[in-house]
Amino acid sequence: MTDAARDEEFTVDVLAERAGMTVRNVRAYSTRGLIDPPRLEGRTGYYTQKHLQRLVLIRTLLGRGFTLAAVEDAILKSPSTASHVALDLLNIFEVDDAQDPTEVISRAELASLSNVSPDHKLIDQMIELGLLEHVDDQTVRMLNPSVVRQGAASVALGLSPDSVVDIVPHMREHLEQISDRFVHHVSRDVAQPFLDAGLPQEEWPTVFERIDQLIPIASQVVVAMFRSVLREAIEVEIGHKLEELAAEGDQPSP
């Protein structure tokens, strides 16, 4: 943050707008002691980035399901410098999708990648799954280009469009469960002791680095385990097919 931004002051109306809440809520949080009093000039109060940072933290915690009482307890027990640290701690769990930005593509080009016709229902089904976003009659936006392109390649290689559409929700459901469990354990084992200790400043870099390193480790483990489980599933399926062929061969000819 630049010195100019740090020194900037604004009225309660501007503060509320930037924090994404009502002036009434800002005043209520101020009354409860969740933000420091503003600097007064006559009857006008002037707020700073510090106030905004605290309000963003409050809004974020409430948005994630914490009660106001729990937020109040956590904030009042934490040092005044901890707001941006808590936000960093919350945001570090958000995986950065910068490596796979959204991409606009024509329906015709996407259809050709899948080896289907441009009016095939697969494209609309991908929109319903949240993989694509409608732009206009001729183009769509790939919200997760890697997944869309791999799905299209699977169809082009012979997997039916209905199979791809069936697989995606199942993968998402199970991966969400895995992700939730991972975040729960990292939060409990790494973040919570840090929070319980009052967010000691000397431990900030270590905690953030540990969490930041654990995220790619989790991704690598998921991929490695999936390959192993997939190999086992393929072997089982081949075994079933061989048994079926053997059974057919043992049947007497009519």
Image (cartoon, grey):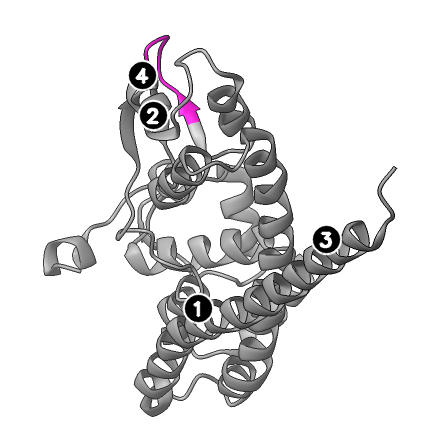
The label shown at residue 108 is 4
Indicate the amino acid at tag 3.
Leu
Would residue 210 be seen by someone viewing this image from the given angle?
yes
Residue drawn at point x = 35 percent, y = 45 percent: 146
Crowd band around label 3 with a 10 angstrom C-alpha radius: few (<14), some (14–19), many (20+): few
Disc 1 residue type (three-letter): Ser
Task: Identify the magenta region.
Answer: 133-138
The front one of 207 and 233 is 233
Spatial CA distance of label 1 from label 2 is 27 Å
Which numbered disc, 1 or 3, marks the residue that appears first in the sequence? 1
- Quarter of the rendering containing residue 114: top left
Q: CA distance from mark 1 to mark 3?
A: 39 Å
The quadrant the N terminus occupies is: bottom left
Mark 2 vs mark 4, CA separation in Å: 6 Å
Give the amino acid at mark 2: Leu
**Upstream in the sequence, badge 3 or badge 2?**
2
Q: State left or right for residue 69 relative to residue 80.
A: right
Query: What label sits on residue 219 in the rendered view?
Result: 1
- Residue for point 19% across, 59% down: 6
Return the disc, 1 or 4, that comes first in the chain's sequence.
4
Q: Regarding mark 4 in the picture, which secondary structure is present there?
A: helix
Of 186 and 228, nearer the camera is 228
Q: Which mark is residue 110?
A: 2
What residue occupies the far top of the structure in this picture? 137
Mark 1 and mark 4 in contact? Answer it, CB < 8 Å: no
Kindly identify the amino acid type of the residue bearing the numbered disc 4. Ala
Tag 3 residue:
245
Q: Are marks 4 and 3 in contact (CB under 8 Å)?
A: no
